[in-house]
Amino acid sequence: MVISLIIGALMIGSVYGMLALGYSLIYSASGLMTFTQGQLLMIGAFLGMQFYKVWGLPFLAAFLLTVLIMFLFGMLLEKCLIRVLLNKGAVSIYIVLSTIGISIILPNLAQALWGSQTIQVPSIFGVTTVKILGVSVQPESLLVIAVGLIAMVLLHLFMTKSRFGISMRAAAMDPLAASSLGINVSLTTGLTWAIAAALAGGIGVLLGPVYGVSTGMGDIIGNKGFAGAVIGGYGNMYGAIAGSLLLGFVETFVAGYITTTYKDFVSFFLLIIVMIFLPRGLFKAKVYDSD
Amino acid sequence: MQQTRKKTILKAAVCLVLLAAALIGLRNQQYLLTLLNFVCMYMISVSGLDILFGYSGQISLGHAAFYASGAYTSALLTTKLGVPVWLAIPAACLVSLALGIIVALPASKLIHHFLALLTISVGQLVYILISRASFTNAMTGIRSIPNIPLFGYELKSKYFFLIFMILMVALFLIIKQCIIHSRVGRAFQAIRENPVAAGGIGINVQKYKIMAFAISAVYTGFAGAMYAHFVGFISPETFTSAQSVMFMTMLLFGGMGSFSGPLIGAAIVTFLNETLQVLGSYRMMVYGAFILAVLLFLPHGISGLIDIVKQSLFKNRGKEDRHADA
């Protein structure tokens, strides 16, 4: 019981973590917020389903193709909407509202393309369950954890070791100074939206075989990922992962031992408690109005 | 000064006559009357949201929570405890007020993106509560909520309910204008423009933010109670986050921080909503497109557009005058 719960918690925690990473990246790079991550995950899941189940591509190809498309989609979103609004001098709350507008449109788009039924995706591996420490686990949930881990490590290396990642962090810290040093700030912020979309879409593809694909799958997950980012300290990449894992554990264990009916109630309540008593999260973020 | 006052009185009189004529004409149009009742409810709740977002600059994407608290309080009190309707409605407003204050206590410290998330979470919490708890009958909802009695006569006909609602809209709008033009309203606007500067000139920012939330919650809670008594049946499906988004769409589309904005937004979006029934669940897409269109092309909504048209008309007239002089 405990071990299967832990694996479940790690899995859902990594899912939230991937979304939270996207939220944090965008926030730390441009000080903007997005509410689209959950819906991008949903779109990613549908794209993956289309490539893998309908067109019969190998899973790896479907996964990479989806990540690439979502990457371009994120770039497009930033160029065609966010940048346009920013150039018009829109205040940050308008950006938030515009991402909410997008996140309303995307599920309807998916419904128009793929219908409103939940679509089951065949298992990636030949086996339906594997035994770990005496409990049977879906191999896909292990894959989610592994991919989450790999993505985190890669992103960490990219941000700290690569030239481009360092210039991204510089642009986030002081856009004016960075652009005077020859860094293309517009490109780096565009890239953060692209990476965030790719992370969400990639994890969506992996979730397909676990939960099935439906237009509503992103609603709650998106908000939970946001909650994970807030709990960890908004804008802090490592905090986002820690907060998401914490949320995953609390949620899974509450569902396992106390109540499944009020599982989501507990997660949102935890979020509100954190916002009231620890508004900077576990890793200190700027949230107050008058900072 | 006298002339402008005369003009406004004349305008008001014309509006009243038109309204009365429209009401007499609509007497037997049951479907239209239902819609107009909804428009009135939305006008009240969106005006409440306007006080919060349009005037004091605090976003709320969870106003369905207050709508729900008003509707459920009134419905539960009248059906389960047999409280008279005229006591249940103030009670509904009080519960919404209390909820507003509880939400505002932490919310008043947060910057807007976090505020957006907090209010979304509150909306989710209330929805989960009413859709799972046994005292609200979970997903089945509450049936046979009594209608509003007035002078010993129940407002069973939609026609009389509409007249009552129009009076209520007028009452709440007058209160809104009084608040906006008072010291409190000016404090709200100062906080909207710059909270730090507002604090600097001695405005208790947190107090006024909580006040804005509380007032807004009462407006929306009252509208929720009206909804419950008008329809006679409530279920959790009405109080999802889609409802909150709809309130926000109405406000953005009509124009924030204005007298007419919420009224125009509520009316247009309600009627569009009905004509778009054929689209089924794709209606939400229209809301999304509306939000984007407003943000991209109409930052002050329809009422802003009307102002621009008016201004350009006056400008043209001014030019003609000048030509005449020359």
Image (cartoon, coloured by chain):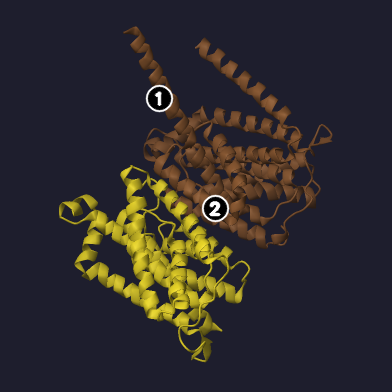
Query: Who is closer to the viewer here, B49 or B38?
Result: B38
Q: Chain of mark 1?
A: B
User: Does the residue at mark 2 contact the one at mark 1 (Cβ under 8 Å)?
Assistant: no
Q: CA distance from mark 2 to mark 1?
A: 34 Å
Q: Secondary structure at mark 1?
A: helix
What mark, if any, has residue B312 been given in the picture? 1
Q: Which chain is brown?
A: B
Residue for point 74% across, 44% down:
B229
Name the residue type under label 1. Ser
Q: Do discs 2 and 1 belong to a common subunit? A: yes
Q: Is residue A183 above or below residue B273?
A: below
With respect to residue B176, does B9 lie above or below?
above
Q: Is residue B98 visible?
A: no
Q: Position of residue A227 (x, y in %)?
A: 46, 62
Give coordinates of residue A35: x percent, y percent.
Answer: 44, 57
The tag on residue B284 is: 2
Q: Quadrant of residue B162?
A: top right
Instruction: Assess disc 2: are there few (<14), some (14-19) or many (≥20) residues with their C-alpha within 10 Å of its C-alpha.
Output: many
Confirm whether residue A230 shows in the render. Answer: yes
**Chain A rendered in what hue?**
yellow
Residue sitting farthest toward the top: B325
Q: Residue placed at 33% from the left, 42% from the top?
A: A89
**In the rendered picture of this protein, how many numbered marks are placed on residues?**
2
Q: Secondary structure at mark 2?
A: helix
Q: Left of B77 or right of it: where is B308?
A: left
**Would residue B322 appear left or right of B269 to someone viewing this image?**
left
Q: Residues within 10 Å of mark 1 (few under 14, many from 20)?
A: few
Question: Residue at 40% of width from left, 44% of height from top?
Answer: B296
* Mark seen at residue B2: none
- Work out which quarter of the rendered image holds the C terminus of chain B and state it: top left
Tell me: B157 left or right of B236.
right
On the image, which quarter does residue A68 sit in?
A: bottom left
